[in-house]
Image: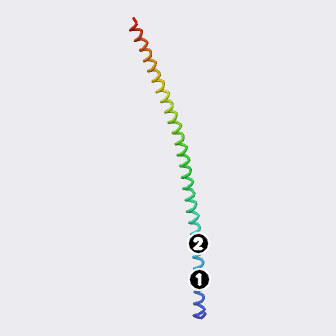
Amino acid sequence: MTDQEEQSLKETMRKEKSATDEAEQLAKDQVRRKANLAREQAIEEDQKARKTKQTEKRAAEEIKQSAIDQTRRKETLAREQAIEKDQEARKLEAKKQTRK
C-alpha cells in the first residue's frame, strides 16, 4: 500500500467516524429534546391541575363564606328584631305604669 493509498484510507475512515459521531450526536440531541418536551408537558399539566384544584378550593371557600355571611346577617336581623320587640314591650309597660 502506498503512502497516498494509506492516506486516502485514513481520510475515508476519519470521514466515516465523523459521520458516525455526528449521527450519534444527532440521536442524543433528539432524545434530549424529547425528554425536555416531556418534562415541560408534565410541568404544564401539573400547573393546570394545581390551578384547577386551587380554583375549586377558592369556589368552595367562597360558598362557605357566603353561607357564613348569610347566617350572620340572619342572626343580626333576628337580634335587632328581638331588641325592637323588647323596646316596644318596655314602652307599652311604661305607658301602663304612667296610666296607673
Q: Position of residue 99 (x, y in %)?
A: 40, 7
Q: Which residue is mark 1?
A: 15
**1 and 2 marks in contact (CB < 8 Å):** no
Give the mark nearest the N terminus, 1 or 2: 1
Q: Position of residue 69 (x, y in %)?
A: 49, 33
Q: Nearer the viewer, residue 31 or 87?
A: 87
Query: Could you tell me which residue is drawn at 57 percent across and 90 percent down?
Result: 7
Query: Could you tell me which residue is drawn at 51 percent across and 31 percent down?
Result: 70
Q: Residues within 10 Å of mark 1 (few under 14, many from 20)?
A: few
Query: Could you tell me which residue is drawn at 44 percent across and 16 percent down?
Result: 88
The disc labelled 1 sits on which kind of residue?
Answer: Lys
- Is 27 positioned to the left or the right of 97 in the image? right
As drawn, 40 above or below 4: above
- Is 74 positioned to the left or the right of 1 in the image? left
As drawn, 88 above or below 97: below
As drawn, 67 above or below 31: above
Q: Which residue is mark 2?
A: 26
Q: Nearer the viewer, mark 1 or mark 2?
A: 2
Q: How is the image coloured?
A: rainbow
Quadrant in the picture for the N terminus: bottom right
Quadrant in the picture for the C terminus: top left
Q: Position of residue 96 (x, y in %)?
A: 42, 9
As drawn, 66 above or below 17: above
Q: Position of residue 63 (x, y in %)?
A: 53, 37
- Is 50 positioned to the left or the right of 92 in the image? right
- Calculate the distance from the C-alpha at mark 1 to the C-alpha at mark 2: 16 Å
The disc labelled 2 sits on which kind of residue?
Answer: Leu
Query: Could you tell me which residue is drawn at 59 percent across and 64 percent down?
Result: 34
Toward the top, the furthest residue is 100
Toward the front, the furthest residue is 99
Q: Residues within 10 Å of mark 2 (few under 14, many from 20)?
A: few
Q: Which mark is residue 88?
A: none
